[in-house]
Image (spheres, helix red, strand yellow):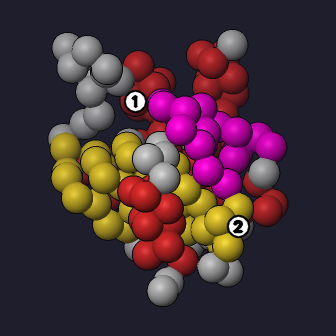
Amino acid sequence: MTDIELAKKYLNQGNLAIAVVKDKELIFKSKDKGIKPMYILATQMEGRVKGSSIADRVIGKAAAMLSIYLGIEEVYGKLMSKRAVEILRENNIPCSYDELSPYIENRDRTDICPVEKIALKVEKPEELIGLLRDFLG
């Protein structure tokens, strides 16, 4: 099994929000919803996850930008936004998804996700991390 296949397996079997696999080893997992697990990876595990594969329930522009920042090798999302696909492909990161959406919605499905609104304002991952720090408090 490839790292991305293993990450997908862990995601589904463990009822996780995110699974990160590197060299066939699960190196990070979380059931936390939203961008918080990706933020933790970017701020606390940056060097360790380079070259790993990520499987996540939702991949929007913010998660795609953080994946690039982290040097992720491959990304899978159960739900992925069109912009996330574009960003990952522009940066030569293979990506796959079960469902493609024009954008990621908020939890009430009444508007665009607040984290995606933040990501729309920036083009550099470093800027995004600073804004996410403020958002997550």
Of residues 109 and 64, the one drawn nearer to the viewer in this rendering: 109
Of residues 38 and 83, the one drawn nearer to the viewer in this rendering: 38
Q: Which amino acid type is marked by label 1?
A: Glu
Compared with residue 90, is residue 58 higher up or lower down, i.e. above or below? above
| Point 55% across, 56% down: residue | 19
Residue 109 falls within the magenta-colored stretch = no
Which image quarter: residue 127?
top right
Of residues 127 and 7, the one drawn nearer to the viewer in this rendering: 7
Q: Residue furthest bottom?
A: 1
| Point 55% across, 33% down: residue | 32
Q: Where residue 91 appears, x then y in whole percent?
A: 48, 67
How many residues crowd around disc 2 within 10 Å: few (fewer than 14), some, or many (20 or more)?
Answer: some
Q: Where residue 46 appears, x then y in whole percent?
A: 77, 54
Disc 2, SS: loop
Q: Mark 2 points at which residue?
A: 50
Determine whether, in the image, residue 45 is placed left or right of residue 13.
Answer: right
- Residue 68 appears in the figure: no
Q: Which residues fall within the magenta stretch?
A: 28-44
| Point 80% across, 43% down: residue | 44
Q: How many circles with numbers are drawn on the protein?
A: 2
Q: Name the residue under label 1.
A: 116
Which image quarter: residue 30?
top right
Disc 1, SS: helix
Q: Where residue 121 appears, x then y in whole percent?
A: 46, 27
Q: Which amino acid type is marked by label 2?
A: Lys
Residue 40 falls within the magenta-colored stretch = yes
Residue depth check, mark 2 versus mark 1: number of the one nearer the observer: 2
Which image quarter: residue 40?
top right
| Point 19% across, 51% down: residue | 100
